Image (cartoon, grey):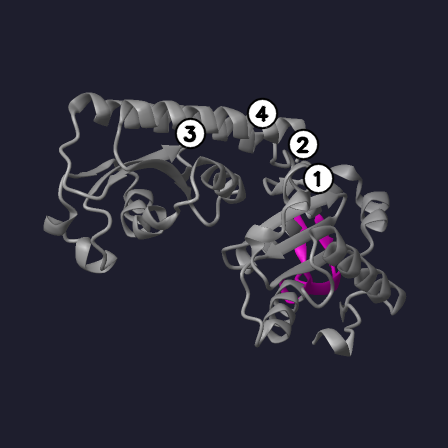
Amino acid sequence: MTATWEKTQQALRQVLMELHDLVPTRDVFMVLAPSSPFTMLSTHIAKERTNDRYPRLMAQVYCQEVQRTGQTLMISDTREHALFSAAQDSSVLAYLGSPIMSPDGTIFGTVCAVHDAPYVFSDQQYRTIVMVAHLLGVLLGIEQSALMDSLTGVYHRVFYDQYLHFDAIELGSTWGIVFIDGDNMKQINDEWGHRIGDLTICELARRISITVPEPRYIIRLGGDEFVVVLPHLDSKDIYQYLWSIAERIALVTSQPMIFDSATIQGSTSIGIAWAPVHGTSVSQVMHQADLAVLDAKAAGKARIVVAPIDPSKE
């Protein structure tokens, strides 16, 4: 983990420890949305805060409601709340959570305080949770903006180099990478100029984004190279699932793109690899997907190639 992320972790851990002193319930913690780029970061903090993650798991129903509505939720006795039947657990009997929201309205997750007995939160505790959630939203909003590619709006290589590259644990035991490389980008730039080339790259990113369902991380490595990282996949049908995703990407990126008087007929070469068959670290699986793309290019472009599979690892 880089120094930037270490400093962010330290700051967030300190905030949560201070918050626990101000709201002295059983536990105070942060739960981030599955689609948030900071999901792994919150897990690191949780592991260092305490080994008891049980209340966090039981509070998921309430946290999801906060993330869904974007509103602070305070429950003095969860047994009297409509969500209690969905939670189906009595270890969290009091809950106070506020959304972690960036200035542009993006909800990253929730700051929560929970207790194992009914608990009447004071007005000051309510305001404190709301204030901390707001400050975390600003902090993570700034952090996220540093990870976004200004041209396309997807994550750029810094996200991979400084964050995703270092931690495959939170992707699950089975996860996949679809590596997409646009074909003939140099020809497009030479014929139509870099403005049309940039518009083509933006359109590629847009089409990939609307084609691949959440949860996923879409990263522009540079030029017209994109990587889609798909976490927590079912090991039984991972080949079919990744192939179907790649086919859909190949289809939408082969449709004509019209910019002013320019009509661009594009295509993409796509490589597929996944853990644990092609490696256990992000860098290992990425390397295999990259090699598969090179094979696709060598075979004539505009095709999908799966990285070679060792039968002993199937």
174 sits left or right of 286 in the view: left
Mark 1–mark 2 contact, CB under 8 Å?
yes
Camera-side residue of 267 and 28: 28
Characterize the local packing of mark 2: few (<14), some (14-19) or many (20 or more) Cα atoms within 10 angstroms: few
The percent position of residue 20, horizontal first and vertical second, equals 33, 28
Which residue bears the numbered disc 2?
Answer: 2
Please, what secondary structure does the residue beneath circle 4 have?
helix
215 sits left or right of 94 in the view: right
Q: CA–CA distance between discs 3 and 4?
A: 16 Å
Which residue bears the numbered disc 1?
Answer: 161
Characterize the local packing of mark 3: few (<14), some (14-19) or many (20 or more) Cα atoms within 10 angstroms: many
Which residue bears the numbered disc 4?
Answer: 7
Which circle, 2 or 3, is nearer the viewer? 2
Camera-side residue of 64 and 93: 93
Which circle, 1 or 4, is nearer the viewer? 4
The mark found on residue 196 in the picture is: none
Q: CA–CA distance between discs 1 and 2?
A: 9 Å
Which circle, 1 or 2, is nearer the viewer? 2
Camera-side residue of 247 and 309: 309
Identify the magenta region.
251-275
Mark 1–mark 4 contact, CB under 8 Å?
no
